[in-house]
Image (tube, rainbow, N blue to C red):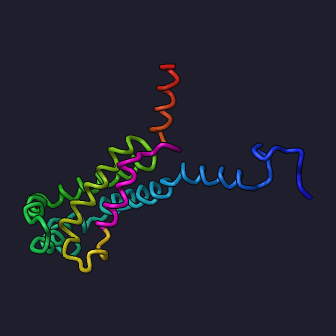
Amino acid sequence: MTRTDVPSGAPDAPTGSSGLRGLRELAARHALLPLRIFLGVTFVYAGLDKLTDSVFLSATGSGSIGELMSGVRDTSAIPAMVDLALKAPVGFAVALAIGELLVGLGVLAGLLTRIAAVGGALISLSLWLTVSWAVTPYYYGNDLIYLMAWTPLVLAGAPYLSLDSLIRSRRSRRTA
């Protein structure tokens, strides 16, 4: 039995080509949302994990930021960057953790998303050039993958389900 009382483009029309088109458009609009959630949660977790790990937040000792940075110094792409971090390893670790936390919260909320994504990309780039530079083959190192994952959010921001879009719509209503 076929419904003939509802035009094919109407909202409550049976699923057909127009229903699939609407679903595709909805999926395309929200395509970056899973990436935002994943990167946001991951960076919030990474920041909190570092801030609550007293062993990591030590200049020396097994599992400390100091030991980690000393261990990767000679194999990093930019040893001078590691040397700079080793001048104040605990301060560097706290700054890194706070940066990860702020980036993650910004991306999750969709607030200043492009700026937060640039921050996430810079953190990932610096970790790739130092900590995971010597990982072979290169695709085993996750920092390069994170760097690439930030790129769509740098380019597109968070156009939907974000504080950025809410602020943008309120501004456009005021100027209209």
Residue found farthest to the bottom: 136
Residue sitting nearer the eye, 116 or 139 = 139
Q: Is residue 29 left or right of residue 51?
A: right
* Number of dots carrying numbers: 0
Task: Tell me where residue 7 appears, x and y as whole percent.
Answer: 81, 43
Stretch in magenta: 143-161
Q: Is residue 55 above or below residue 150?
A: below
Please say if 55 is above or below 40: below
Please, is residue 116 above or below residue 144 in the view?
above
Q: Is 55 on the left-hand or right-hand side of 8? A: left
Residue drawn where x is 40% and y is 61% of the image: 42
Q: Residue at x 89, y 44 (%)?
A: 5
Residue 6 shown left or right of residue 41 in the figure? right
Residue at coordinates 33% horizontally, 61% vertically from top-left?
Answer: 148
Q: Quadrant of residue 89?
A: bottom left
Q: Residue at 31% across / 77% down in the picture?
A: 140
The quadrant of the image that shows the N terminus is bottom right
Magenta highlight on residue 154? yes
| Residue 103 screen position, x and y as percent | 34, 50
Q: Given the current orientation, which residue lies at the most extreme right position?
A: 1
Percent from the top left, x then y, of residue 56? Answer: 25, 67
What kind of secondary structure does the magenta stretch mostly adopt?
helix
Left or right, 127 with respect to 148, comes to: left
Q: Is residue 63 magenta?
A: no
Relative image position of residue 154 (x, y in whole percent): 35, 49
- Of residues 133 and 15, the one nearer the viewer is 15
Depth check: 101 or 73 in front? Answer: 73
